[in-house]
Amino acid sequence: MNFLIGHLSSCSQLCRSWKSELTNVIMNCAVVLLLTLSCFTWSAAADTPSTAAPKKLKYLIDPPVYAEVAGRRGDNVTLLCILRTKPTHYKVKWTKLEPGHMGTENIIMISNADAFKPYGRLGLRASLRKAHIMDASLLLRRLELEDGGTYRCELVNGIEDESVFLTLRVEGVVFPYQSKNGRYRFTFLEAKEACAEQDGTLATYKQLFRAWTDGLDWCNAGWLLDGTVQYPIIHPRPICGAELFSGIRSYGPKDKHHDRFDAFCFTSQTSGSVFYKSGSFSFEQAGRACKHQGAELALVGHLYAAWHFQNYDQCDGGWLRDGSVRFPISNPRRRCGGIPEAGVRSFGFPNKTTHLYGAYCYR
Ligand SMILES: *[C@@H]1O[C@H](CO)[C@@H](O)[C@H](O)[C@H]1NC(C)=O
Ligand SMILES: *[C@@H]1O[C@H](CO)[C@@H](O)[C@H](O)[C@H]1NC(C)=O
């Protein structure tokens, strides 16, 4: 997949962007290399459970399978934790280890033979599976975008507490998002809000990395959830930095209050679906056309989710709720933007009254 902008009218804007990008990138070049490298070690370290090398487990089974569980938003998932022997008295404690808050624990639930106590946001959707008497697996219902991360199942018996760690990955798609006012306009908080307004969250470094391995090549830097600013490059080219290597280019952590960039958003499966209403609509007319169908103009995240999960393909520009005009291409062909890779193409934010397009509705 590829997210290059696929329309000539966007080109002059794009080229201008790339020029100032170049200046930026040259200045940051040395820093970038260093940070990209340290980033790998960093994110690896952040995910390693803080306990030392795992000792041989007596009570819990270290899962040979399902150590990584994946699900889409809305799915129910099971994080396996099976006992092999039961101590006389014990509790099972499930926690989520939040990266960036090393040491602090986010308890989901604590349970013993007779009681089950849920905690926090995750606790509301959590229960123990109890498929059999040795089963302490966690059932997490209706996955949300922020649920991804490392989870710990801890057997607490006061003497030899034991833990197993599992990774939950929310399956989804990363999309770059730029303000309607132009390139590099978001502070960190504004980027976070912009993603939320498009039915997404700021992407994590891992999500961006995975998107890059899937083909995301984007020559504008955007905020990530950890407060760093990065961008993924598949085809190195001078306008996207002087480096010859493909990879995630990083500016490192930036000033969340004063620095301004674009955003990388993450979204997943939606409960509704996207459809195209053909016509020559102004933005306002497009909104009404969707209303007539008992729907609303789709959000950018909705369109990306449909493209990613349903291979949605429609060779017509249509209005979205943010005032941008886009179209999703799964089978690239010459007359649909002429870009060889699949992707969601953008016409940017055209004049809402003078430009006429179809509408992408969501219901
Ligand atoms: C998830 O579990 C709930 C109740 O436990 C059930 O109603 C719902 O249909 C399940 N959802 C999926 C996607 O399996
Ligand atoms: C859109 O075009 C109309 C008519 O040319 C113009 O009056 C209006 O200012 C334009 N709007 C924007 C936001 O540029």
Image (tube, rainbow, N blue to C red):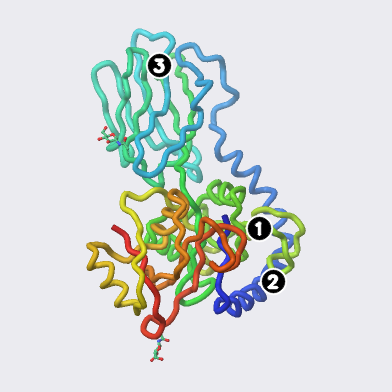
Cα distance, mark 1 to mark 3?
50 Å
**Can residue 318 be seen by looking at this rendering?**
yes
- For the point 54% across and 28% down, the residue is 51
Question: What residue does disc 3 label?
Answer: 158
Relative to 1, is 60 above or below? above
Near-viewer residue (15 or 46) = 15
Q: Depth-wise, is mark 3 or mark 2 nearer the camera?
A: 2
Q: Amino acid at mark 3?
A: Gly
Residue identifier under label 1: 233
Report helix, strand or loop for mark 3. loop
Quick one: 265 or 153, which is closer to the camera?
265
Q: Amino acid at mark 1?
A: Ile
Q: Which mark is residue 285?
A: none
Measuring 60% from the left and 64% from the top, which residue is drawn there?
339
Q: Residue 105 appears at what percent x and percent y?
A: 42, 36
Q: Earlier in the sequence, mark 1 or mark 2?
A: 2
Q: Answer with mark 3 or mark 2, whichever residue precedes in sequence.
A: 2
In the image, ligand 1 is in what quadrant? top left
Q: Is residue 23 left or right of residue 175?
A: right
Measure how far apart labels 3 and 2 are at the Cα level: 58 Å
Residue at the spot of label 2? 22
Vertical relation: 173 (above or below) 256: above
Element on which disc 1 rests: strand
Q: Which percent across, then down, holds residue 203?
A: 49, 53
Residue 205 placement, left or right of 77 = right
Q: Where in the figure is residue 268, as x and y percent of width and height?
A: 42, 49
Disc 1 residue crowd, few under 14, some 14–19, many 20+, Cα 10 Å: many
